[in-house]
Image: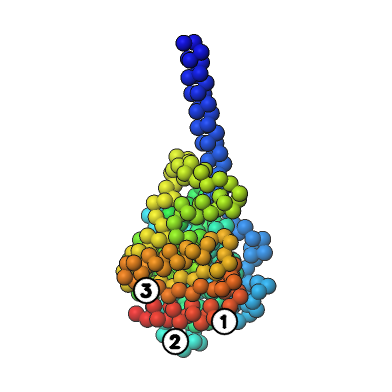
Amino acid sequence: MRLRRWMIALAILIVLLLIVGYAGASYVIYNRLTAVTAGCSAAEDRDNTPAAFDTPDVDTAPYLMPDYEEVRFPSRDDGLTIDGWYVPGPSDTGRLSGNTVILVHGLGRCKRSPSILLPAGMLYRAGYNTLLIDLRDHGDSQVEDGRYAGGTEEYRDVLGAWDWLVNERSIPPERIGLFGTSLGAATVLIAFGEEPRVAAVWEDSSFADIQSAVDAELTRFGLPTVLAPGGLLIGKLVAGDDITAYSPQAGVAKANGRPIFITHGTDDTRLSVAYADVLAETARAHGDEPEVWIIDGSEHVRGMFEHTDEYESKLTAFFDAALSG
């Protein structure tokens, strides 16, 4: 009887140790996957502006935007201060516009990234106004908690930018589109789903749902995916972040006839090109027909640098049609 009690006690202790160990490992994983350093992570991007930016891949001279304004506005609902650059379209294009696109960067990047400045320059050349923003905890925007939430909080920053354009610059909703890369792509898709007045969205290299994206990140780091549920739970308990509350896939499902453009590289090792198929099929299942451009041989968010002319042509043609009013 005494031996049995000892065995039961030992079993309980082992279970408790396993629970504590799993919780500890889950916290480490959560911390590793969600921590963001304020500012721009890429040192070579930190001096970039719309008027002067460079990339070794493309001659940026035709895409420079000499006149821009630094602006700040509140994120929708929670009031965090979001920093951005507003670039009015050139007056010599001869195009009646008002058409405006909000551009959103990826994880750890900022509005100074060439992957945001280059497409902004493409749109500028076509006569568009652009608004380049830093998501919370990134760039020059307010630091909330130093973590990203997979777009489930950040989408409110995008909608704060949209509110600012509508209320402060008097731009009609039907003239405003969204553009995003990577995490920014996921974020604009969520914002698109949550604000039915957003006219159109272009996404470059998004994931479809955060749970599979977390699994992919763990695999990329050589870590067991069994830790994913624990990491998601830790996020809820520690930071109050339910990063499964919204998803890009759910945003696409709410398009309700609004234009969507999906692009992704076949050789993307960060976020699988399979996500593009999932997003496109979700749209079709809900009666929409997105435009899809799968770029053969391209890595993560590399299409704009490797196929610049084609990217520019497709980007401007999409928004020309989508924001025609």
Residue situated furthest top in the rendering: 2
For marks 3 and 2, the one nearer the N-term is 2
Q: Earlier in the sequence, mark 1 or mark 3?
A: 3
In the rendered structure, the answer to whether residue 38 lies left or right of residue 237 reads: right
What residue occupies the far bottom of the structure in this picture?
A: 94
Label 2, residues with CA under 10 Å away: few <14, some 14-19, many ≥20: few
Q: Tag 1: residue type?
A: Asp
**Quarter of the view holding residue 41:** bottom right
The picture places residue 138, in percent across and down from the top left corner, at 54, 57
Type of the residue with mark 3: Glu
Nearest to the eye among marks 2 and 1: give it: 1
Do callouts 3 and 2 mark residues in contact (Cβ within 8 Å)?
no
Residue at 68 percent of width and 72 percent of height: 56
Q: Can I make out residue 235 in this image?
A: no
**Regarding mark 2 in the picture, which secondary structure is present there?**
loop
Q: In the image, what residue type sits under mark 2?
A: Arg
Q: Residue at x 42, y 60 (%)?
A: 248
Residue 1: x, y in percent?
46, 11
Which residue lies at the image location 58% right of the left edge and 46% below the top edge?
A: 223
Question: Disc 2 versus disc 1: distance between alpha carbons?
Answer: 21 Å
Task: Please state which of residues 272 and 321 is positioned toward the viewer in this rendering.
Answer: 272
**Residue behind mark 1:** 309
Q: Which residue is mark 2?
A: 95
Label number found at residue 289:
3
